[in-house]
């Protein structure tokens, strides 16, 4: 079974995440998000998360919390 989750970010960029429940993978494809037109956080970012532990790491203000808030549905348009 494949479940599609879609949301709109405050920047009006459309983003999607697909959860494939038969293999427990999360595919993030072509993620775009910006707090303002000048403050782009993600531009065409994609990732595939396999089952198990996933660590989100990066420099300060690199978008870690924004990514998790997008995936949790806390940031919507």
Image (spheres, rainbow, N blue to C red):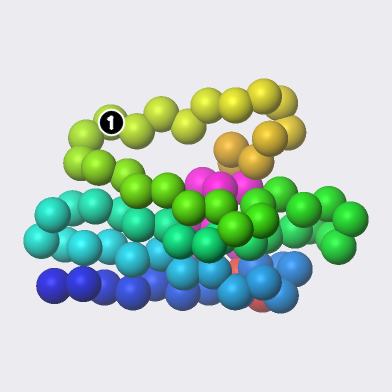
Comparing 59 with 75, the one in front is 59
- Residue 77 position within the rendered picture, expressed as x and y whole percent measured from the top left: 66, 75
**Are there few (<14), some (14-19), or many (20+) residues within 10 Å of tag 1?**
few
- Residue 55 position within the rendered picture, expressed as x and y whole percent measured from the top left: 41, 29
35 horizontally vs 50: left or right: right
Please tell me which residue is depicted at 68% across the width and 35% down the height of the picture. 62
- Using the image, determine if residue 19 lies above or below residue 59: below
Comparing 2 with 10, the one in front is 2
- Using the image, determine if residue 50 lies above or below residue 20: above
Q: Residue furthest left?
A: 22
Identify the magenta region: 66-75
Q: Residue furthest right?
A: 38
Q: Quadrant of residue 14?
A: bottom right
Q: Is residue 66 at all visible to an observer of this figure?
A: yes
Residue that label 1 marks: 53
Q: Is residue 69 at all visible to an observer of this figure?
A: no
Quadrant, the N terminus: bottom left
Q: Quadrant of residue 23?
A: bottom left
- Residue 67 forms part of the magenta stretch: yes
2 horizontally vs 66: left or right: left
- Using the image, determine if residue 22 lies above or below residue 65: below
Comparing 50 with 6, the one in front is 50
- Residue 28 position within the rendered picture, expressed as x and y whole percent measured from the top left: 43, 57
Q: Quadrant of residue 5?
A: bottom left
Q: Main secondary structure of the magenta part?
A: helix
- Residue 9 position within the rendered picture, expressed as x and y whole percent measured from the top left: 65, 68
Please tell me which residue is depicted at 53% across the width and 26% down the height of the picture. 57
38 horizontally vs 47: left or right: right
User: Does dot 1 land on a helix, a strand or a loop?
Assistant: loop
- Residue 68 forms part of the magenta stretch: yes
């Amino acid at each position: 079974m494949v479940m599609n989750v879609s949301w709109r970010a405050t920047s009006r960029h459309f983003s999607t995440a697909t959860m494939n429940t038969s293999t427990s993978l999360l595919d993030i494809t072509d993620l775009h998000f910006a707090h303002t037109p000048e403050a782009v956080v993600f531009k065409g970012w994609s990732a595939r998360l396999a089952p198990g532990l996933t660590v989100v790491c990066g420099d300060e203000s690199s978008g870690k919390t924004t990514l998790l808030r997008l995936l949790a549905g806390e940031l919507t348009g």
